[in-house]
Image (cartoon, helix red, strand yellow):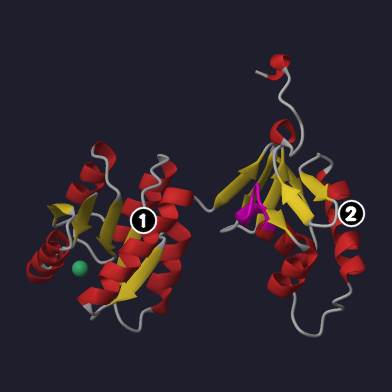
């Protein structure tokens, strides 16, 4: 695994790089935003530690440009204490996580590991299932690019199914993970929500597994559907 550290504070840069090297990662280092941006554009990293306050080009702009260019490597941002606006800007720019200075090196390492694990499964905040997309950052759902308006319950239901795509999700699990205690926990209600969600999406991606629950999968690989030769 190879990581990039972009931090203009020489001491901090050295400390982070040393800790990551000790943890077994290959490390590249940059000391300003331009150098960091260039490395991120031209090299393949499994993760990046990116300071927000950088000379020449600030960290948020570096990240915005990477994400625009389709670079999805996990990015952990370093933000200044008490500047909540930096954290918001970092997340809006596409950061996966942040730590506030000063931080414990162990925390930085733990967060990086978690980011890379997640990246192995899912690097982007946009989930897709066949023609259906769900953008978690924007909170938007579309079918074949056309926006679909969902209620908050329908959205949460779809988001949960997206996170568990291809797996059977029981009604009990849906109730447990999606709704607060005051919610009507009658499982028939779930059926009603699923029905509405299906109608709004208008495509066959939520499949009922009789007696088990539901599975979200693209129409072509619906459970129990044999792949016909002409689908290839
Ligand atoms: Ca700095």
Q: Residue at x 25, y 47 (%)?
A: 37
Spot occupied by residue 192 in the image (x, y as percentages of width and height): 91, 61
Decide: marks 2, 1 in contact (CB < 8 A)? no
Q: Residue at x 36, y 49 (%)?
A: 73
Q: Is mark 1 within 8 Å of ligand 1?
A: no
Residue 225, numbered circle: none
Spot occupied by residue 154 in the image (x, y as percentages of width and height): 78, 61
Q: Is residue 8 above or below residue 232?
A: below
Q: Quadrant of residue 11?
A: bottom left
Spot occupied by residue 2 in the image (x, y as percentages of width and height): 22, 49
Q: Is mark 2 within 8 Å of ligand 1?
A: no
Q: Secondary structure at mark 2?
A: helix
- In what quadrant of the picture does the C terminus appear? top right
Q: Is residue 49 above or below residue 231?
A: below
Spot occupied by residue 186 in the image (x, y as percentages of width and height): 89, 74
The residue indicated by pointer 2 is 195
Depth check: give the residue in front, 143 or 110: 110
85 vs 218, left or right, is left
Q: Which residues are magenta?
A: 161-167
Q: Residue furthest top?
A: 230
Q: Residue at x 38, y 71 (%)?
A: 86
Residue 116, numbered circle: 1
Is residue 12 in sight in this rendering? Answer: yes
**In the rendered structure, which disc, 2 or 1, sits on the residue that comes first in sequence?**
1
Q: Is residue 154 above or below residue 147?
A: below
Q: Is residue 56 above or below residue 219?
A: below
Q: Secondary structure at mark 1?
A: helix
């Amino acid at each position: 695994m190879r990581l990039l550290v972009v931090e203009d504070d020489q001491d901090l840069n050295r400390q982070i790089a040393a800790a990551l090297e000790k943890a077994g990662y290959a490390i590249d280092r940059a000391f300003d935003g331009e150098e960091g941006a260039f490395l991120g554009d031209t090299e393949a990293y499994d993760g990046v530690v990116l300071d927000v306050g950088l000379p020449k080009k600030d960290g948020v702009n570096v990240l915005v440009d990477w994400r625009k260019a389709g670079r999805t490597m996990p990015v952990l941002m370093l933000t200044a204490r008490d500047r909540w606006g930096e954290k918001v800007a970092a997340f809006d720019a596409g950061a996966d996580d942040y730590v506030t200075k000063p931080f414990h090196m162990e925390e930085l390492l733990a967060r990086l590991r978690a980011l890379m694990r997640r990246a192995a499964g899912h690097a982007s905040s946009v989930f897709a299932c066949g023609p259906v997309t769900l953008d978690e950052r924007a909170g938007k759902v579309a079918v074949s690019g056309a926006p679909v308006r969902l209620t908050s319950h329908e959205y949460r239901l779809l988001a949960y199914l997206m996170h568990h795509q291809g797996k059977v999700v029981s009604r009990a699990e849906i109730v447990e993970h999606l709704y607060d205690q005051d919610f009507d926990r009658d499982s028939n209600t779930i059926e009603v929500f699923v029905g509405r969600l299906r109608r709004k999406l208008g495509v066959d991606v939520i499949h009922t597994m009789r007696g088990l629950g539901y599975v979200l999968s693209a129409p072509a690989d619906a459970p129990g559907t044999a792949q016909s030769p002409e689908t290839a």
